Image (tube, helix red, strand yellow):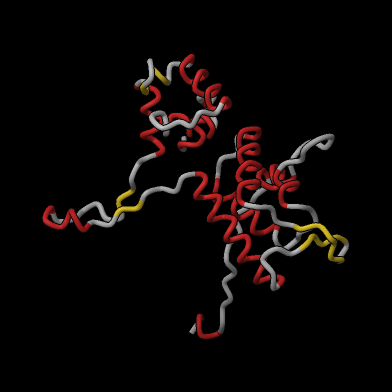
Amino acid sequence: MIKEEFLFASGLDFNHLYVLQNINNLPEVNRLTGYYNILKAKGYIDGEVLSDKGQEIVTMFNIINKNEENVDNNKQNSEEVQKPLSFSQWVAELHRKLQDKLLNLTGSNSPNLVFDGKVQKWPYLCGVLDLEGKLKKFIGKYTMTDLERIEKLLLKHCEIRNQKIMRYIIKEGNEKGSDMALDYENYVEEKPKVILTKKDFF
């Protein structure tokens, strides 16, 4: 079970994770107080510090991945390490990739929708914060936590642009459902095409 699945299976989301990770430096926001109280009731916070359960969650998301495991002890200070991106950092990087993809496709990193082959007046891509909020709702509702798959689906949708990316992720208001959730369930990894020539046989 990957760490995001463990988080959601525990009845928590990224808002709860934020509170746990920043328990000693939380801003005075009523909404965060609500998450704090829920975590306390569930035993993730003991008094004003993390319980063992809370520390387990935080540690799980703060694991440092070493690029090289077998290094000489004398060279440990120069060992390269890579910290995993936080969810917000991942979304910011994803937003940059979406802008780059759109720029390559259209010549603009903020093009409008295309419907029935015609360019519309509404912008396709949203801002970073709106994208993060929408993805949190999507993951929380559908528990689809494969971020690599989500990224590939959003980059693929840039080629279509027949609805706003926010609406593609999850619909709001009177509309229900998510086209991205359907694509996620039916996702098949694309395999690179191998073209053989005569010299491959002789």
* Percent position of residue 173, x then y: 81, 35
Q: To which quarter of the image does residue 13 belong?
A: top right
Count all numbered tags in the image, as a single digit: 0
* Percent position of residue 121, x then y: 84, 61
Residue at left offset 65%, top offset 54%? 154
- Tell me if 18 is positioned left or right of 119 in this view: left
Residue at left offset 59%, top offset 56%? 95
Q: Residue furthest front?
A: 28
- Tell me if 81 is positioned left or right of 114 in this view: left
Q: Is residue 8 visible to the viewer in this orientation of the structure?
A: no
- Tell me if 30 is positioned left or right of 24 in this view: right
Q: Is residue 93 visible to the viewer in this orientation of the structure?
A: yes
Residue at left offset 74%, top offset 48%? 168
Instruction: Look at the picture and state if 176 lies above or below 188.
Output: above
Instruction: Look at the picture and state if 103 lies above or below 6.
Output: below
* Percent position of residue 63, x then y: 35, 41
Q: To which quarter of the image does residue 100 belong?
A: bottom right
Viewer-proximal residue among 81 and 149: 81
Residue at left offset 38%, top offset 29%? 24
* Percent position of residue 19, x then y: 47, 30
